[in-house]
Amino acid sequence: MTVHGIVVNVTSAKDVDGVTILKVSGYLDTTTAGELETALYGLLKKDSYKIVIDLSGVTYISSAGWGIFIGEIKDIRNHGGDLKLAGMVGDVFEVFQLLEFQSILEAYPTTDEAVGAFAKSSSTRA
């Protein structure tokens, strides 16, 4: 799906059942955040609550973009899932840290590591 400045692709992780990867490219601001929000809501409607957002292709996230992640995390966790961020580039990661979102959301250098974190959390519960 493409809206001016953003591309969102949804893929399923092959190694971990039930983990969905949203790969986002471009920038997230008030004009483009709706596309990501639609994709995320689509996953939640399908009861997909283990989500990795691959941000390696994102160069900028405004408060509207960050709000999407923060706004849905409680509902996702109430359904036994989680939302993990992966691959943030320098400037985006810097803002993530500045806003102290690491106390709310887990971030990983790569998508594989984020997907692997779901596997680890599943095995520690078993």
Image: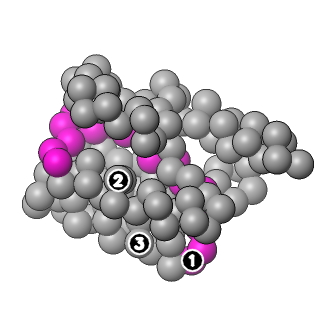
Amino acid beneath label 1: Lys
Is mark 1 in CB contact (under 8 Å) with mark 2?
Answer: no
**Residue sitting nearer the eye, 84 or 103:** 103
The image quarter containing residue 80 is bottom right
Is residue 97 left or right of 32 when viewed as pictured?
right
- Residue indicated by mark 1: 46
**Residue 104 vertical position relative to residue 18 in the rendered view, above or below:** above
Q: Secondary structure at mark 1?
A: loop
Residue 65: percent from left, percent from top: 23, 51
Task: Name the residue at 26% across, 54% down.
Answer: 67
Which tag, 3 or 1, sits closer to the chain's start? 3
The image quarter containing residue 87 is top left
Is residue 39 left or right of 106 when viewed as pictured?
left
- Residue indicated by mark 2: 70
Q: Report if residue 20 is visible in the image.
A: no
Label number found at residue 9: none
Task: Name the residue at 61% across, 68% down.
Answer: 79
Asked if the magenta segment contains residue 24, the reply would be no
Is residue 65 left or right of 38 when viewed as pictured?
left
Asked if the magenta segment contains residue 50, the reply would be yes
Q: Secondary structure at mark 3?
A: helix
Is mark 2 in CB contact (under 8 Å) with mark 3?
Answer: no
Q: Which residues are magenta?
A: 46-63
Label number found at residue 41: 3
**Residue sitting nearer the eye, 6 or 101:** 101
